[in-house]
Image (tube, rainbow, N blue to C red):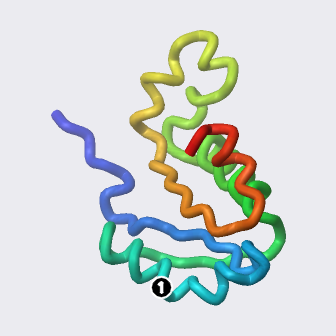
Amino acid sequence: MQMPDPGADRRPLVIANPAAGSGRTGRDLTHLVAAIREAVGDLEVTETRGLGGDGTLNEIVNGLLTGAPGAAAATPAAWTAGTAVEAAGDLPALGIVGTGTGGDYGRSLSI
């Protein structure tokens, strides 16, 4: 019996920092969201102002790894035990639209 997908009824979530890129993200947010919506369909948008882009990304990744279904197996200890790869299919996907000025995270991943 196939288990139901717990995320099947969820819409993608865009988390944007309108202050990123010296305010460029805020000025372009309507166009960015429209382009993403065209690519993936209906979505939710929320804004944050507390952290810069890489800091926001860090918080999002930490939230995904500690709060997502299957995340208990996606911890650093699980990687060494070899169980995180099995749990990775349970984690939400993460996409990055780099509009800030730093982009250290993207550069470190060569994206």
Q: Measuring 60% from the left and 18% from the top, which residue is drawn there?
A: 79
The amino acid type of the residue labelled 1 equals: His
Q: Is mark 1 on a helix, strand or loop?
A: helix
Q: In this view, does 84 lie to the left or right of 106?
A: left
Q: In which quarter of the image is residue 103?
A: bottom right
Q: Is residue 92 left or right of residue 59?
A: left
Position of residue 58 measured from the top left corner of the image (x, y, whole percent)? 73, 50
Depth check: 9 or 95 in front?
95
Location of residue 101 with respect to 6 vertically, above or below = below
Q: Measuring 74% from the left and 49% from the top, which residue is drawn there?
A: 104
Residue position for label 1: 31
What number of labels is visible? 1
If the image is split into quadrants, where does the C terminus sit? top right
Position of residue 3 measured from the top left corner of the image (x, y, whole percent)? 26, 40
Position of residue 87 measured from the top left corner of the image (x, y, whole percent)? 46, 29
Depth check: 45 or 6 in front?
45
Location of residue 38 with respect to 83 vertically, above or below = below
If the image is split into quadrants, where does the N terminus sit? top left
Location of residue 13 with respect to 35 vertically, above or below = above
Q: Measuring 65% from the left and 42% from the top, which residue is drawn there?
A: 66
Q: How crowded is mark 1: few (under 14 residues within 10 Å), some or many (20 or more)?
A: few
